[in-house]
Amino acid sequence: MSRIRNCLLALSLAMVTTVGPSQSAVAASASELATDGKAALERLYAQSAKARTYGRDARAILVFPKIVKAGLVVGGQSGEGVLLVDGKPEGYFRISAASIGLQAGGQTFGYALFLMNDSAITYLRENDGWAIGTGPSVVVVNEGAAETANSTTLRKDVYAFPFDQKGLMAGVDLEGSKISRIKR
């Protein structure tokens, strides 16, 4: 069963990379990514006072303004983002994942990852790719959890806030996602 699953995942990745538009057709410039990332972060802050608290305490923020996710049994997601340090762009990244299971539909959403300490930033800078679940600990914050967060409860390496979810697919998560540096 594991072998079949791996074959289906490989097939879905091949379909996403060959059937979808070319990277050059959809790739944003560095200035577009920085502008979109800052605007997305402001939208998140307008929706959540607690996100502003995380933002104030974070050492850096990795913002993916638009991630596209689609699937019919086999699925995938991808998006590009910007690493903001002291409000200035320091690097550009891609997030991608493939999945298999009971799923159908498509959606777009954004993610802001608040890197709370220097070790999380160092890990991101020094590793060519970061699979969520390895390296720094990541906590996905939903609105209910965000209501109880304060500066004394912010003890993890990275806090992730989903936002701007649109579409007809249940679930927005980072499980199985890989974050890789891109050149812009």
Image (tube, rainbow, N blue to C red):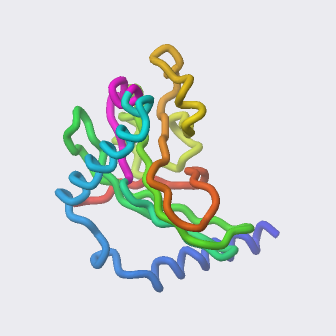
Left or right: 6 with respect to 45? right
Q: Is residue 54 magenta?
A: yes
- Of residue 47 and residue 154, the one placed in the foreground of this image is 47
Please determine whether, in this image, residue 15 is positioned above or below residue 141.
Answer: below
The residue shown at (50%, 55%) is: 178
Q: Position of residue 179 (x, y in %)?
A: 44, 53
The residue shown at (49%, 14%) is: 152
Residue 97 visible, this orientation: yes
Q: Position of residue 172 (x, y in %)?
A: 57, 54
Q: Quadrant of residue 103?
A: bottom right
Q: Is residue 144 magenta?
A: no
Q: Residue furthest bottom?
A: 19
Q: Position of residue 75 (x, y in %)?
A: 60, 71
Left or right: 63 with respect to 144? left
- Of residue 72 and residue 2, the one placed in the foreground of this image is 72
Image quarter in which the N terminus is found: bottom right
Left or right: 157 with respect to 125? right
Q: Residue furthest top?
A: 152
Q: Quadrant of residue 84?
A: top left
Residue 77 visible, this orientation: no
Q: Residue furthest right?
A: 1
Magenta stretch bounds: 53-64
Q: Position of residue 50 (x, y in %)?
A: 44, 29
